Image: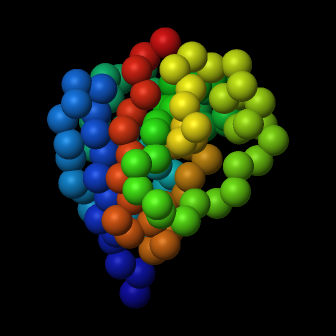
Amino acid sequence: MKQDVKITIIDREGQSHEIDAPTDMNMNLMEVVRSYELAPEGTIGICGGMAMCASCQCYVLSDTELPEMQDDEEAMLAEAFHVEDNSRLGCQIPITEELAGLKVQLAPEE
């Protein structure tokens, strides 16, 4: 039985939310943000999770081990605004048990 993992998401207003993210539903971080309505509808995951926009960009604040960045994510972040060294696209981070304790902050809207 897979466990939910506790992750902390800081929204664009600076509010911190500790949430339980399901590891058994094949969701990614962007979809979790959407399902918990931590960003206004239409401001996150605009491309549907294809790494074609940067609306789900977030800053990774914990030293959680994440899957390696693929070329399309890297290319998208190279063109995005507000990019930091710890930027990732939420749609490219699958929710797995390894993410327990992850802390991210949503990047400002472009």
Residue at left 49%, top 72%? 98
Please identify the quarter of the rendering in which residue 84 is found. Answer: top right
Measured as percent of width and height from the top left, residue 77 is found at 66, 29
Depicted 109 relative to depicted 18: above or below: above
48 relative to 21 in the view: left or right: right
Q: Is residue 8 shown left or right of residue 2? A: left
Residue at the top extreme of this rendering: 110
Image position, residue 30 (x, y; %) = 47, 41
Specify the farthest residue to the bottom. Answer: 1
- Quarter of the image where the N terminus is located: bottom left
Q: Residue at x 58, y 37 (%)?
A: 85
* Rendered position, 81 above or below 18: above
| For residue 82, above or below residue 86 | above
The percent position of residue 31, horizontal first and vertical second, equals: 45, 44
Q: Is residue 10 visible?
A: yes
Looking at the image, which is closer to me, 24 or 110? 110
Q: Residue at x 18, y 35 (%)?
A: 15
Residue 89 makes an appearance in the image = no
- Is 103 left or right of 25, judged from the image as shown? left
In which quadrant of the rendered view does residue 50 lie? top right
Q: Nearer the viewer, residue 94 or 42?
A: 94
Residue 21, position in %: x, y? 34, 60
Residue at left 70%, top 49%? 69
